[in-house]
Image (spheres, helix red, strand yellow):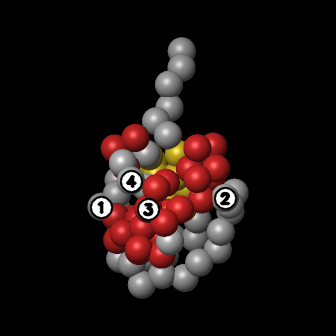
Amino acid sequence: FAWIRERIGLAREQLKTDAATVAELVEELRAREDRYAVAFKDISAVRVALDQELAEFSAPLEGVREGAFFPPMTGG
């Protein structure tokens, strides 16, 4: 998450969107400003959670109150 936050320059953001899915939201953000385009250039290295549950980029946004983007988790 830190590198996404660093590239965008915001830890949190509240927004309204007409996007139906996470993927559409990412496209909307990419088109918004260059810093979002850079942050979401390669989403293969990004995971998403909707209302604190892991989700796919094809997941619908209807009724979602919180979304989070972060790098894949590793550890042991």
Outermost residue on the top side: it is 76
Question: What residue type is disc 4 on?
Answer: Lys
Which residue in the structure is indicated by mark 2? 9
Is residue 48 something that shows in the picture? yes
Residue designated by label 4: 41
- Kind of residue indicated by mark 2: Gly
Q: Are marks 3 and 4 in contact (CB under 8 Å)?
A: yes
Which sits earlier in the primary sequence, circle 2 or circle 4? 2
From the viewer's perspective, is residue 43 above or below residue 75?
below
Q: Which residue is found at the position 43% from the left and 45% from the top?
A: 46
- Find the distance from the CA under tag 4 to the CA under tag 1: 17 Å
Disc 3 element: helix
Give the residue pinned by disc 1.
58
Q: Earlier in the sequence, mark 2 or mark 3?
A: 2
> Hey, what amino acid is under mark 3?
Ala
Q: CA distance from mark 3 to mark 1?
A: 19 Å
| Left or right: 10 as drawn, with respect to 43 | right
| Nearest to viewer (mark 4 / mark 1) | 4
Vertical placement of residue 10 versus 63, above or below: above
Crowd tier of the residue under label 4, counting other residues whose Cα lies within 10 Å: few below 14, some 14–19, many 20 or above: few
Q: Residues within 10 Å of mark 2 (few under 14, many from 20)?
A: few
Circle 1 packing at 10 Å, graded few (<14), some (14-19), many (20+), is few
Nearest to N terminus: mark 4 or mark 1: 4
